[in-house]
């Protein structure tokens, strides 16, 4: 295990950028939710930026956002919102239905993911853009890690390495195997879209994770007592209660840090 996990950091996913100012709990917000806003909130806690690639590739079969425009946006969010822990690159997910949608191969998605990261990192070395591993089979992920290494990126030295295309199968042994193999390379992994079952299975090998699952759950349920909205799919008290339940349900060996502030190294 190489020293054990100092504590999983959990980023609560939200569609509501205003929450950045309303809670110090770490948040995960999509570029798509922030891009068109004239004014931005000031973050009360740390947060991470999702590039919105899953939506973009699902809708268009390609990235329609230009890298330069994405970098301009990340810089603005970093300056105006503050406390940006890291930002995802414009990566290419490898779920079979996404690969089918783009008409490309897994290998080509990986090549483009690495090329985009290198471009963003080179163009804006001061911005916290993180490398993301994409693939489908375990061997794919190993090859993707090798692509970064061959390009001169020391993944073990990176503060965050994203793990993509796993969230929809996170409760499987296959997902646990992929996480374990990559954690064995001493990578500080962020599990995109990891929630209860995935965290129970593999959370002890992850450095961080994010999830919006609470919102989908809330959409199908009546609102909390006393809440006047139709459901709690965009409700901060609901989301915070879900987060507390989720984190409290994890085995003690990966109880997360509960504060929203970066730990001292
Ligand atoms: Zn509510």
Image (spheres, grey):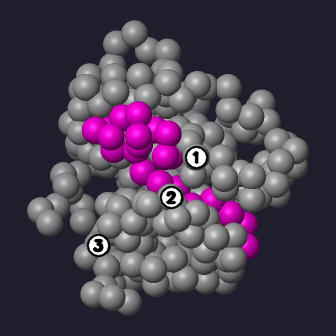
Label 2: how many Cα within 10 Å (few below 14, some 14–19, many 20+): few
- Quadrant (top left, top right, bottom left, bottom right) of the C terminus: bottom left
The magenta segment is: 117-137
In the image, is residue 42 part of the stretch drawn in magenta?
no
Task: Determine the residue positioned at 50% across, 39% down.
Answer: 119
Q: Does the residue labelled 2 lie within 8 Å of ligand 1?
A: no
Q: Taking 99 as reference, is 67 left or right?
A: left
Whether residue 245 is visible, yes or no, is: no
Could you say whether the residue bearing mark 3 is in a helix, strand or loop?
A: loop
CA distance for labels 2 and 1: 9 Å
Task: Determine the residue positioned at 79% across, 36% down.
Answer: 61
| Image x and y of residue 185, in percent | 45, 80
Task: Determine the residue positioned at 62% across, 40% down.
Answer: 53
Say which of marks 2 and 1 sits in front: 2
Task: Determine the residue positioned at 67% across, 37% down.
Answer: 55
- Would you identify the image quadrant in which residue 59 lies? top right
Residue lying at the far top in this picture: please name it: 38
Q: Taking 168 as reference, is 223 left or right?
A: left
Label 3: how many Cα within 10 Å (few below 14, some 14–19, many 20+): many
Label 1: how many Cα within 10 Å (few below 14, some 14–19, many 20+): some
Q: Taking 22 as reference, is 134 left or right?
A: right
In the image, is residue 129 part of the stretch drawn in magenta?
yes
Give the residue at mark 2: 151
Q: In the displayed structure, would residue 138 be above or below residue 260?
A: below
Task: First in sequence, mark 3 or 2: give its number.
Answer: 3
| Image x and y of residue 254, in percent | 34, 78
Task: First in sequence, mark 2 or 1: give its number.
Answer: 1
Say which of marks 3 and 2 sits in front: 2
The label number, if any, that marks residue 115 in the structure image: 1
Give the residue at mark 3: 7
Q: In the displayed structure, would residue 33 be above or below residue 188?
A: above
CA distance for labels 3 and 1: 31 Å
């Amino acid at each position: 295990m190489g020293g054990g996990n100092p504590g999983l950091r959990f980023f609560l996913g939200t569609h509501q950028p205003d929450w950045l100012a309303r809670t110090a709990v770490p948040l995960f917000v999509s570029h798509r939710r922030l891009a068109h806003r004239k004014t931005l909130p000031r973050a009360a806690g740390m947060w991470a930026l999702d590039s919105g690639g899953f939506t973009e590739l699902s809708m268009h079969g390609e990235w329609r956002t230009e890298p330069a425009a994405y970098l301009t946006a990340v810089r603005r969010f970093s300056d105006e919102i503050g406390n940006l822990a890291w930002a995802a690159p414009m990566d290419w997910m490898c779920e079979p239905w996404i690969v089918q949608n783009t008409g490309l191969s897994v290998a080509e998605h990986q090549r483009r993911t690495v090329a985009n990261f290198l471009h963003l990192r080179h163009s804006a070395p001061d911005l916290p853009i993180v490398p993301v591993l994409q693939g489908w089979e375990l061997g794919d992920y190993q090859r993707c890690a090798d692509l970064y290494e061959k390009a001169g990126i020391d993944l073990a030295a990176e503060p965050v390495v994203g793990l993509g295309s796993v969230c929809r199968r996170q409760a499987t042994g296959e997902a646990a195997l992929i996480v374990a193999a990559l954690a064995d390379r001493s990578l500080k992994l962020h599990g995109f879209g990891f929630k209860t079952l995935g965290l129970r299975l593999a959370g002890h090998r992850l450095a961080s994770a994010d999830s919006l699952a609470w919102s989908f759950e809330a959409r199908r349920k009546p609102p909390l007592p006393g809440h006047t909205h139709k459901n709690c799919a965009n409700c901060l008290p609901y989301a915070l209660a879900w987060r507390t339940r989720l984190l409290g349900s994890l085995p003690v060996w990966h109880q997360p840090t509960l504060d929203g502030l970066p730990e001292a190294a």
